[in-house]
Image (tube, rainbow, N blue to C red):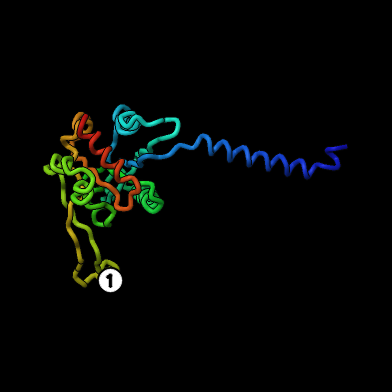
Amino acid sequence: YIWDYYKLPIVILCIFLYIIGYSLYGHFTHKENVLYTALVNVSASESLTRQLSTDFLDSLDADTSKETMQLYAGLYLTDDEANPYHEYTYASRMKILAAIDSEQLDVVLMNKEAFDAFSQNGYLCDLDKLLTASDSHLYEVLKPYLVTNTTILEDNSIDLQFDSSIPYQAVTEEYTMGLDMSQAGLIHQAGFEDVVYLGIIENSTHKDTAVKYIQYLFSE
């Protein structure tokens, strides 16, 4: 009798209770991301991946029941059509742009090709300014490893699409955008053949933690 006459209210009540329960579960199990890091054109072993993520959280004495860290892997950027990873470039670029736009990317570990791409698009912050303001002693220690690169402020690439006879022109700016990680403990031990660079995203909301990440990488 109750089901026949109160079927709709009961269904609505069940849906309402489910939504409330799901919301409460999400609230109490939610973890705050203390840092978003990406490996671009760089592959890491299982042990190095752990060292670059969970071990860093341990070094912060983070409460892992409430705090976590995101490490994006398998991202590739290249303009070389002969590169075996070229087919993944578009998907990787979209994922990177989405992460930057949503302020969910703070630190990038990358090869020279990716470093140039991030630099040219103006995604990387000025490490001279950041490190000087955050930790002047650390800045002095890292000076030998700081690397400058060029960002393109304005160019005529769109015009070239319509008239290839026009010479390419660009307004650029050069500043310190990256760190050569060759001598950083964990990266050095991993034995990469090519130089791995570290950059911090300009709109990062975790720059203080990013600086601690650099300290952690060089202290191992």
Q: Quadrant of residue 170?
A: bottom left
Q: Residue furthest top?
A: 47
Q: Position of residue 148 (x, y in %)?
A: 16, 51
Name the residue carrying label 1: 159
Q: Position of residue 202 (x, y in %)?
A: 29, 52
Q: Position of residue 208 (x, y in %)?
A: 29, 43
The one of 61 and 95 positioned closer to us in this rendering: 61
The number of numbered discs placed on residues in the rendered structure image is 1
Q: Residue at x 67, y 39 (%)?
A: 17
The one of 83 and 111 positioned closer to us in this rendering: 111
Tell me the quadrant of the picture where the C terminus can be found. Answer: top left
Q: Is residue 91 visible?
A: no
Q: Residue at x 41, y 51 (%)?
A: 102
Q: Residue furthest left?
A: 144
The one of 80 and 122 positioned closer to us in this rendering: 122
Q: Is residue 83 visible?
A: yes
Q: Residue at x 36, y 38 (%)?
A: 71
Q: Residue furthest right?
A: 1
Q: Is residue 13 left or right of residue 132?
A: right
Q: Is residue 140 left or right of residue 24?
A: left
Q: Position of residue 61 (x, y in %)?
A: 34, 29
Tell me the quadrant of the picture where the N terminus can be found. Answer: top right
Q: Residue at x 38, y 38 (%)?
A: 70
Q: Give the class, few, some or many, for how many residues have Cα within 10 Å of label 1's Cα (few <14, many ≥20).
A: few
Callout 1: helix, strand or loop? helix
Residue type marked 1: Asp
